[in-house]
Image: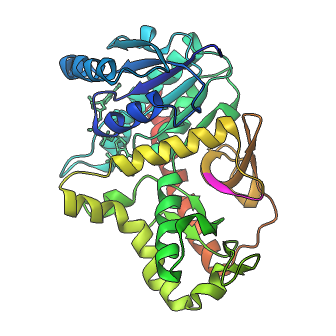
Amino acid sequence: PAAPIRVLVTGAAGQIAYSVIFMIASGQMFGPHQPVILHLLDIAKMADALKGVVMEIDDGAFPLVAGVVATTDIKAAFMGIQVALLIGAFPRGPGMQRKDLLKMNASIFKEQGEALKNYASRSVKVLVVGNPANTNALTTMTQASGLPASNFSALTRLDQNRALSMIAEKVGVNVNKVKNVIIWGNHSLTQLINRFLCYNSRVPDVNSAYIQNYPSPSVITPVSTAVNDEKWIREQFIPLVQNRGAAVIAARKLSSAASAATAVVCHMRDWVLGTKDGEIVSMAVCSDGSYNVPKGLIFSFPVTCRGGEWTIVQGLKITDFIQSKIDLTIKELNEEKEAALSFLN
Ligand code: NDP
């Protein structure tokens, strides 16, 4: 049998973790034959709740779980890990200034970046989920000097999945027929909009997307043709994707958790096991200057994955409308970056 993979989940007593841990344990992230050792980290005041999560892992009797390290100690949590799902973050609260949120999170992710540098496997794959995710990933990467920039990513897959599902519903096809919707830019701040910010930073782009076997088998139809309603795309679809998180909060009185966990699984599974031929997914990764995004910014790009490495898909056509939105998200991420870096010294 394969050697177990050591997977760290932070914020392990939180909502998203409560879904994602059980998906990992049941083999959805690394496949049905890959054992895992779960490293679960939370803060001291959550230690009891974390014990309860461990009891439930035990009670699941998962054959793939080769061990559990549940701890509030950073060193024990990060020791030897090969995958890091950084979900825990300082939550925004009513009346909280953006600067304060960035500051609190800079200190958390600074410590975790250092822990990655000191204790994790050199090939550790890091996925930051805790918001503001792109900038938290940037802080982590900056502090984990010596680890390759290609080890770091942030989650925009939930936005991608939301977009795929909305297009599928509009056209009236199963979601697995919709391919290559791209999310550019930043995942993080849209949920903040409704409270105290006014950026629309994630940019869903259907201009490279198509519908497979539609309207008949072996035919491929561009999404723009199948939808045939540019006004709907600009005025309904894009805002719906951008505001979906807030809609879930309004309905559930809690933020999305199971769908966020599903997106975490999709992101890491594709990174480790590879994307399907011809299929593009979105991951926020360190920009190499592609599409004129400033080098070093953590930015969501279209990627493919092979052999555990992601590659930015080049040469996609970007319309002026999408470019104007990308320009805004670059501006926002640059501002966040400046603020976060100013807190690190
Ligand atoms: P959740 O598990 O619901 O969310 C965790 C983080 O994921 C939040 O920052 C949240 O952002 C973010 N997130 C990113 N994408 C999404 C999405 N699409 N939908 C919802 N959330 C998204 O939070 P809980 O409060 O339930 O749990 C957090 C846990 O983290 C707690 O147990 C807490 O103790 C722990 N924690 C751990 C730290 C550490 O390990 N050092 C530090 C701080 C907290 P958003 O805020 O925008 O909803």
Q: Would residue 145 be counted in the magenta stretch?
A: no
Ligand 1 is located in which of the four quadrants? top left
Q: Magenta segment range?
A: 278-282
The relative height of residue 271 versus residue 249 in the rendered view (above or below) is above
- For image coordinates 47% across by 38% down, the residue present is 136
- Report the colour scheme: rainbow
Give 324 or 314, whichever is nearer the viewer.
314
Give the image location of residue 4, x and y in percent: 58, 15
Which image quadrant is residue 196 in?
bottom left
Left or right: residue 230 compared with residue 179: left
Vertical arrangement, residue 63 with respect to residue 134, above or below = above
User: Which of the image's four quarters has the N terminus?
Assistant: top right
Residue farthest right in this picture: 315
For the question of whether residue 297 can be seen, the reply is no
From the top left corner, tell me how far across and down residue 308 is, in percent: 72, 34
Q: At 42% across and 74% down in the image, what residue appears? A: 239
